[in-house]
Amino acid sequence: MAIKIYIDQGHNPLNPNAGAEGNGLREQDIVFRIGIELAELLRANGNFEVRLSRPNADTQIGTSNSSSLRLRVEDANSWGADYFISLHTNASSIPSATGSEAFAFSEPSAAFSLGEDILYWLNRTTGLRNRGMKVRSGLYVLRRTTMPAILVELGFITNASDAMLMSQRPDLFAEGIYQGILEYTGV
Protein backbone atom coordinates (compact mmCIF):
# COMPACT_ATOMS: atom_id res chain seq x y z
CA MET A 1 0.00 0.00 0.00
CA ALA A 2 1.33 3.42 -0.98
CA ILE A 3 2.60 5.87 1.64
CA LYS A 4 0.56 9.07 1.43
CA ILE A 5 2.65 12.25 1.59
CA TYR A 6 0.94 15.63 1.87
CA ILE A 7 3.19 18.41 0.61
CA ASP A 8 2.10 21.80 1.87
CA GLN A 9 3.72 24.56 -0.13
CA GLY A 10 3.57 27.27 2.49
CA HIS A 11 1.69 30.50 1.93
CA ASN A 12 -0.51 31.81 -0.88
CA PRO A 13 0.38 33.53 -4.14
CA LEU A 14 -1.29 36.70 -2.78
CA ASN A 15 -2.43 37.93 0.64
CA PRO A 16 -3.96 36.71 2.85
CA ASN A 17 -1.11 34.47 3.97
CA ALA A 18 1.51 35.52 1.43
CA GLY A 19 5.07 34.64 2.47
CA ALA A 20 8.37 36.37 3.10
CA GLU A 21 10.29 38.28 0.46
CA GLY A 22 13.99 38.83 0.02
CA ASN A 23 16.58 39.34 -2.68
CA GLY A 24 13.83 40.03 -5.23
CA LEU A 25 12.20 36.64 -4.56
CA ARG A 26 8.94 35.51 -2.97
CA GLU A 27 8.71 32.57 -0.55
CA GLN A 28 5.44 31.30 -2.04
CA ASP A 29 7.00 31.02 -5.53
CA ILE A 30 10.11 29.17 -4.33
CA VAL A 31 8.24 26.63 -2.22
CA PHE A 32 5.66 26.08 -4.96
CA ARG A 33 8.38 24.97 -7.39
CA ILE A 34 10.21 22.81 -4.86
CA GLY A 35 6.92 21.14 -3.91
CA ILE A 36 6.11 20.35 -7.54
CA GLU A 37 9.57 18.83 -8.09
CA LEU A 38 9.32 16.82 -4.85
CA ALA A 39 5.89 15.49 -5.88
CA GLU A 40 7.32 14.34 -9.24
CA LEU A 41 10.13 12.44 -7.50
CA LEU A 42 7.75 10.76 -5.06
CA ARG A 43 5.23 9.81 -7.76
CA ALA A 44 7.94 8.35 -10.00
CA ASN A 45 8.97 6.05 -7.14
CA GLY A 46 5.68 4.11 -7.11
CA ASN A 47 5.66 3.62 -3.33
CA PHE A 48 4.04 6.99 -2.65
CA GLU A 49 0.79 8.82 -3.23
CA VAL A 50 1.13 12.60 -3.14
CA ARG A 51 -1.21 15.50 -2.59
CA LEU A 52 -0.11 19.12 -2.94
CA SER A 53 -1.76 21.97 -1.06
CA ARG A 54 -1.10 24.16 -4.12
CA PRO A 55 -1.27 22.04 -7.30
CA ASN A 56 -1.15 25.22 -9.42
CA ALA A 57 0.92 28.37 -8.96
CA ASP A 58 -2.25 30.47 -8.61
CA THR A 59 -3.99 28.18 -6.09
CA GLN A 60 -5.23 30.45 -3.29
CA ILE A 61 -6.20 28.71 -0.02
CA GLY A 62 -8.58 30.44 2.39
CA THR A 63 -9.65 34.03 2.90
CA SER A 64 -7.51 34.75 5.99
CA ASN A 65 -4.31 33.44 7.57
CA SER A 66 -6.30 31.24 9.94
CA SER A 67 -8.59 29.78 7.26
CA SER A 68 -5.58 29.18 4.99
CA LEU A 69 -3.87 27.11 7.68
CA ARG A 70 -7.09 25.34 8.72
CA LEU A 71 -7.97 24.32 5.15
CA ARG A 72 -4.50 22.87 4.53
CA VAL A 73 -4.71 20.78 7.71
CA GLU A 74 -8.29 19.67 7.00
CA ASP A 75 -7.31 18.60 3.47
CA ALA A 76 -4.41 16.47 4.77
CA ASN A 77 -6.48 14.99 7.61
CA SER A 78 -9.48 14.11 5.42
CA TRP A 79 -7.23 12.59 2.73
CA GLY A 80 -5.67 10.36 5.38
CA ALA A 81 -2.08 11.43 4.77
CA ASP A 82 0.62 9.37 6.46
CA TYR A 83 3.01 12.35 6.64
CA PHE A 84 2.59 16.13 6.33
CA ILE A 85 5.53 18.22 5.11
CA SER A 86 5.13 22.00 5.03
CA LEU A 87 7.73 23.84 2.93
CA HIS A 88 8.88 27.36 3.81
CA THR A 89 11.79 29.75 3.42
CA ASN A 90 13.22 31.41 6.50
CA ALA A 91 13.81 35.14 6.96
CA SER A 92 16.03 37.13 9.29
CA SER A 93 17.07 40.72 9.89
CA ILE A 94 20.62 39.32 9.94
CA PRO A 95 21.60 38.92 6.25
CA SER A 96 24.30 36.35 7.07
CA ALA A 97 21.80 33.92 8.68
CA THR A 98 21.93 30.74 6.59
CA GLY A 99 20.93 27.09 6.51
CA SER A 100 18.01 24.70 6.81
CA GLU A 101 16.02 23.85 9.94
CA ALA A 102 12.76 22.10 10.70
CA PHE A 103 10.10 21.93 13.37
CA ALA A 104 7.98 19.16 14.86
CA PHE A 105 5.24 19.19 17.51
CA SER A 106 7.24 17.13 20.01
CA GLU A 107 10.38 15.10 20.64
CA PRO A 108 10.81 12.18 20.57
CA SER A 109 8.33 11.59 17.76
CA ALA A 110 8.05 10.12 14.29
CA ALA A 111 7.89 13.66 12.90
CA PHE A 112 11.07 14.70 14.72
CA SER A 113 12.93 11.65 13.33
CA LEU A 114 11.61 12.29 9.79
CA GLY A 115 12.76 15.89 10.06
CA GLU A 116 16.24 14.82 11.15
CA ASP A 117 16.56 12.58 8.08
CA ILE A 118 15.31 15.34 5.77
CA LEU A 119 17.71 17.91 7.24
CA TYR A 120 20.63 15.49 6.92
CA TRP A 121 19.88 14.98 3.22
CA LEU A 122 19.18 18.67 2.55
CA ASN A 123 22.67 19.38 3.86
CA ARG A 124 24.10 16.64 1.61
CA THR A 125 22.35 17.86 -1.56
CA THR A 126 22.49 21.65 -1.08
CA GLY A 127 25.57 22.17 1.09
CA LEU A 128 23.57 24.49 3.34
CA ARG A 129 24.23 24.26 7.07
CA ASN A 130 21.97 21.90 9.04
CA ARG A 131 20.55 24.15 11.78
CA GLY A 132 18.78 21.17 13.35
CA MET A 133 15.34 20.06 14.44
CA LYS A 134 13.38 22.12 16.95
CA VAL A 135 10.10 21.60 18.82
CA ARG A 136 7.33 24.12 18.02
CA SER A 137 4.13 22.83 19.60
CA GLY A 138 2.32 26.11 18.91
CA LEU A 139 2.44 25.93 15.11
CA TYR A 140 -1.07 25.23 13.80
CA VAL A 141 -0.01 22.84 11.02
CA LEU A 142 1.94 20.74 13.52
CA ARG A 143 -0.64 20.92 16.30
CA ARG A 144 -3.78 20.12 14.31
CA THR A 145 -2.61 17.45 11.86
CA THR A 146 -3.52 13.86 12.72
CA MET A 147 -0.32 12.43 11.21
CA PRO A 148 3.40 13.11 11.81
CA ALA A 149 3.98 16.64 10.51
CA ILE A 150 7.04 18.78 10.00
CA LEU A 151 7.59 22.33 8.87
CA VAL A 152 10.84 22.73 6.93
CA GLU A 153 12.59 26.09 6.60
CA LEU A 154 14.63 25.28 3.48
CA GLY A 155 16.98 28.26 3.62
CA PHE A 156 16.97 32.00 4.26
CA ILE A 157 15.33 34.10 1.56
CA THR A 158 17.06 37.08 3.22
CA ASN A 159 20.50 35.53 2.61
CA ALA A 160 21.67 36.25 -0.95
CA SER A 161 23.37 32.89 -1.52
CA ASP A 162 20.61 30.79 0.14
CA ALA A 163 18.00 32.68 -1.90
CA MET A 164 19.91 32.23 -5.15
CA LEU A 165 20.34 28.49 -4.53
CA MET A 166 16.65 27.97 -3.70
CA SER A 167 15.61 29.97 -6.76
CA GLN A 168 18.06 28.50 -9.28
CA ARG A 169 18.33 24.90 -8.01
CA PRO A 170 14.93 23.85 -6.62
CA ASP A 171 15.83 20.33 -7.74
CA LEU A 172 18.54 20.08 -5.05
CA PHE A 173 16.01 20.88 -2.31
CA ALA A 174 13.42 18.46 -3.74
CA GLU A 175 16.09 15.74 -3.96
CA GLY A 176 17.24 16.32 -0.38
CA ILE A 177 13.71 16.07 1.01
CA TYR A 178 13.03 13.03 -1.18
CA GLN A 179 16.17 11.23 0.03
CA GLY A 180 15.25 12.04 3.63
CA ILE A 181 11.78 10.55 3.12
CA LEU A 182 13.30 7.43 1.56
CA GLU A 183 15.72 7.04 4.46
CA TYR A 184 12.98 7.50 7.05
CA THR A 185 10.40 5.22 5.37
CA GLY A 186 12.91 2.61 4.21
CA VAL A 187 11.38 2.28 0.75
Image: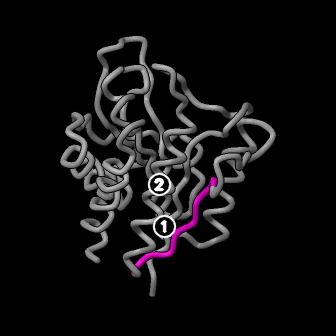
The three-letter code of the residue at mark 1 reads: Ile
Residue 46 place in picture, x, y as percent: 41, 81
Residue 26 place in picture, x, y as percent: 55, 30
Q: Is residue 105 left or right of residue 19?
A: left
Pointers 2 and 1 in contact (CB under 8 A)? yes
- For the point 54% across and 69% down, which residue is it? 81
Asked if the magenta segment contains residue 122, the reply would be: no
For disc 2, the marked residue is 85
Q: Is residue 4 left or right of residue 98?
A: right
How crowded pointer 2 is (Cα within 10 Å; few <14, some 14-19, many 20+) is rated as many
Magenta stretch secondary structure, dominant: strand
Q: Nearer the viewer, residue 59 or 72?
A: 59
The three-letter code of the residue at mark 2 reads: Ile
Q: Which residues are magenta?
A: 47-54
Residue 76 place in picture, x, y as percent: 61, 63
Q: Which mark is residue 5?
A: 1
- Where does the N terminus fall, quadrant-wise? bottom left
Mark sitting earlier along the chain (2/1):
1
Whole-number angstrom distance, CA of label 2 to CA of label 1: 8 Å
- For the point 38% across and 57% down, which residue is it? 111
Asked if the magenta segment contains residue 53, the reply would be: yes
Decide: is 105 above or below 158. below
